[in-house]
Image (spheres, helix red, strand yellow):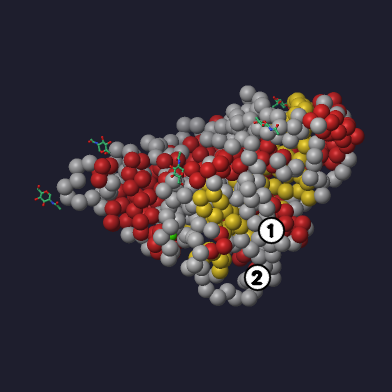
Amino acid sequence: MHISRILLFSALSASGFAFDCIPSAFNSILPSNATVTFTRTLSDNATFTVPDSDIAYPTSPKQLRALCAVQVNVTSSPSSAFSFGLFLPDEWNERFLAVGNGGFAGGINWLDMGAGVGYGFAVMSTDTGHNSIASDLTWALNEPEKKIDWGYRAMHGSVELAKLVTEAYYKAKPKYSYYSGCSTGGRQGIRDIQLYPDDFDGVLAGAPAWWTTHLQTWTVKLGLYNLPATSAHHIPPSLFTAIGAEVLRQCDPQDGLVDNIISDPRRCDFLPETLLCGPNVTNQTAAGCLSAAQIDTLYNIYNDYVETNQTFIFPHLELGSEAQWSVLLGSDKPNPLGTEYVQDFLLNDPDWNYNDFNYSIVELADKLQPGNATAYDYDLSPFHKRGGKLLHYHGLSDGLIAPGSSVYFYKRVLQTLLPKGLELDSWYRLFLVPGMQHCQGTPSDVNAPWYFAGANQAGALSASTHSVPGFRDAKHDALLALMAWVEGDQAPERLVATVWRNESVADGVARQRPLCPYPKQARYNRRGHPDRAESWRCEYLYEMKAQYS
Ligand SMILES: *[C@@H]1O[C@H](CO)[C@@H](O)[C@H](O)[C@H]1NC(C)=O
Ligand SMILES: *[C@@H]1O[C@H](CO)[C@@H](O)[C@H](O)[C@H]1NC(C)=O
Ligand SMILES: *[C@@H]1O[C@H](CO)[C@@H](O)[C@H](O)[C@H]1NC(C)=O
Ligand SMILES: *[C@@H]1O[C@H](CO)[C@@H](O)[C@H](O)[C@H]1NC(C)=O
Ligand SMILES: *[C@@H]1O[C@H](CO)[C@@H](O)[C@H](O)[C@H]1NC(C)=O
Ligand SMILES: *[C@@H]1O[C@H](CO)[C@@H](O)[C@H](O)[C@H]1NC(C)=O
Ligand SMILES: *[C@@H]1O[C@H](CO)[C@@H](O)[C@H](O)[C@H]1NC(C)=O
Ligand SMILES: *[C@@H]1O[C@H](CO)[C@@H](O)[C@H](O)[C@H]1NC(C)=O
Ligand SMILES: CC(=O)N[C@H]1CO[C@H](CO)[C@@H](O)[C@@H]1O
Ligand SMILES: [Ca+2]
């Protein structure tokens, strides 16, 4: 039985593909600026062992279906080159998927490719043109061509060549092309459809780091609110838990249901003064309280970054993001994602001191737009015109990228297109995810449903997960929802997010809850168990005008 299955399988493979999984075969169809680095043939249920050189994505995807893996290196300019990896499964779903990166990482995201190949996609990931971990930007110093590769060129160039290879290998054009990425991955997808609207039929973009020039400079500004670490206004990370607990205490019931989830942090009127220390406190950490100067720092963190003449620079972190504050606010200096951006991307001056940060840095970034990375073309009508669908999401407990930047982007697209008579609802929807942190995960005391097979999420469960275990359908899986929208014209009215007990699928589902397209919100029906999705509905908080809905 087992042997005959294998024989049948290999017979199909040999007849199914145009050529063997060997470098010379791929090289013969690639243009002269591209060469194969390696190929590998994987049998059913095998592990793809990530090459040691890929320091950004070291986790090897497991239990893959039988496939051909190929890595290709492409020269993009006299001083730059990018690589991409491609999984070509024996049993192909006749569709193409590109997955994205994170931070300023340079490396092929083999783990997300593994999740994608689980559905049967031919899956591609680009290394964006350099080799580094997500928080290392030193590769960009005085390297304008590498910045462009990271900004958009490596993604588009990799998509083009990977599609060409896919078509040649299967002797058939992919029927549909998709994209899935979070954080920088979200930016890459949106930037790509702005510049090359024909690349994808559907894009799943999570927590997009789309506003590069403002996001990275806000990262410096935010860090400085809580510095120097010796000052009276500094909030030590040991107090973040107490702040988060007080936010939850006040804001959880304000949405109408005490369930540890803050459904809409923007509608909570938080009174931080309840955290003030009394006169006799000798140990703040033990007491979990703050001084008046520290409360002022809280106000800075929870308010938008606005510059001279009311110029809006970047939105604030939301109430409920405290469990992730250690990333941008927990060190004795601002996060390198901000400082190194100014040093290596903007000024090409590794000696620049973050204490010299001021508005002129933001203005310069907007003027120079290094790498042309900012995804600021709000006119997405070319993507709409070709039938494209954009499914955008952002966790409201994100401590790295303020979720308001997603709302701001959505509104800018509305402002650009609604006056031209183009509504968004039929092709672009934004889902805010209460209690979800950056791309994935939830604070343990909140335990909000956060899993819907968004980018990076499968890998957060295990190296062999794809889709939503136990719920592999378009109601629970955002990528399947996107496909149903693109291919079946079924717009996602809601998406059910899942969280398992102890973040372990084997321990069973803890909670499921619908996510709603902005500006609709999930409302409890007041009957039925609140941990079941059926007990909730999506609705506007007030009556919407027809042209809008
Ligand atoms: C696949 O491999 C895993 C170990 O990686 C093993 O536990 C499992 O039994 C295998 N499944 C099949 C169908 O062979
Ligand atoms: C890709 O090719 C360039 C030459 O264009 C070379 O410098 C670089 O090391 C190669 N990169 C990889 C990952 O093979
Ligand atoms: C590689 O060469 C092809 C064919 O000449 C060209 O279309 C493509 O733009 C080149 N790619 C890059 C990244 O320079
Ligand atoms: C603080 O300590 C002083 C002296 O021990 C005491 O008189 C006072 O009541 C205390 N204040 C509070 C608010 O506990
Ligand atoms: C203050 O309290 C914390 C938490 O209880 C404890 O870890 C720390 O050692 C205390 N600090 C001092 C100076 O007593
Ligand atoms: C603020 O507005 C004033 C009056 O329009 C203008 O003169 C000034 O240059 C503006 N400042 C900045 C930093 O844009
Ligand atoms: C910003 O800082 C630079 C360097 O420290 C300084 O030259 C410049 O005058 C400052 N600009 C503003 C608007 O404060
Ligand atoms: C950057 O991208 C925009 C489109 O978003 C384009 O108009 C502009 O020419 C590009 N600039 C450079 C320097 O490539
Ligand atoms: C090992 C562990 O943490 N188990 C916990 C799993 O979750 C249930 C409730 O959801 C707890 O009771 C267990 O202690
Ligand atoms: Ca609540």
**Viewer can see residue 312:** yes
Determine which quarter of the picture holds residue 232: top left
Image quarter for residue 368?
A: top right
In space, the residues marked 2 and 1 are separated at their CA atoms by 14 Å
Residue drawn at x 82%, y 26% is 22
**Residue 504 at x, y = what percent?**
53, 41
Q: Say which residue appears at 74% left-offset and 35% top-offset.
A: 65
Horizontal placement of 158 versus 109: left or right? Answer: right
Give percent across and percent down for residue 230: 29, 38
Q: Is residue 111 left or right of residue 247?
A: right
Which residue is identified by label 1?
Answer: 380
Residue that lies at the very extreme toward the top in this rendered image: 52
- Pointer 1 local density, CA inside 10 Å: few below 14, some 14–19, many at least 20: many
Q: Amino acid at mark 1?
A: Leu
| Quadrant housing the C terminus | bottom right
Q: Residues within 10 Å of mark 2 (few under 14, many from 20)?
A: few
| Residue at mark 2 | 419
Asked if residue 168 can be seen in this view, the reply is no
| Count of numbered marks | 2
Residue occupying image coordinates x 36% and y 51%: 245
